[in-house]
Amino acid sequence: MFTGTLALDLLLGDVHSLKEKRSVVRPIVAELKRRYEVSAAEAGSLDLHRRALVGVAVVAADAQHCREVLEACEGLVAQRPEVELLSAHTSLFKEGDD
């Protein structure tokens, strides 16, 4: 069993409050969950209104499937016009790794 994680550092476009930030980030998180059946959440930069850290996690029987799902998630977010993807960090863990 493998667990893959993806951390997406986002710069938000024309956002001037935390309320506006939520209206941009929530649909992205919801679409990731719906389309790819992953666990996703806003996981950092919570008090900054123009930045967001979105975390994504997936569990699969093989490493290749984890990579494919996380790459698709990254591509989906990178194509969103209302955000700029500043960085993406992927990690892969095998059951039994310490």
Image (spheres, rainbow, N blue to C red):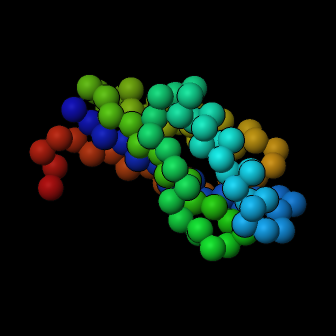
Please report the residue visible at 12 percent of the width from the left and 45 percent of the height from the top.
Answer: 96
**Residue 48, x across and y down, in percent:** 67, 73
Position of residue 62 in the picture relative to residue 40 (left or right): left
Q: Position of residue 71 (x, y in %)?
A: 53, 36
Instruction: Name which residue lies at 37% across and 28% down.
Output: 64
Q: Quadrant of residue 22?
A: bottom right
In the image, taking residue 66 as reference, residue 3 lies left or right, namely: left
Q: Is residue 31 above or below residue 43?
A: above
Residue 68 % position (x, y): 47, 29
Give the vertical position of 33 relative to 22 (above or below). above
Above or below residue 96? Residue 18 is below
- Whole-percent x and y of residue 79? 74, 39
Residue plotted at (59% across, 69% down): 45
Q: In the depicted view, which residue is nearer to us: 22 or 76?
A: 22
Q: Is residue 77 visible?
A: no
Residue 42, compared with residue 50, is above or below; it is: above
Identify the residue at horizontal 52%, vertical 28% (top origin).
36
Can residue 81 be seen here? The reply is yes
Q: Residue furthest front?
A: 19
Quadrant location of the C terminus? bottom left
If the image is split into quadrants, where does the N terminus sit?
top left
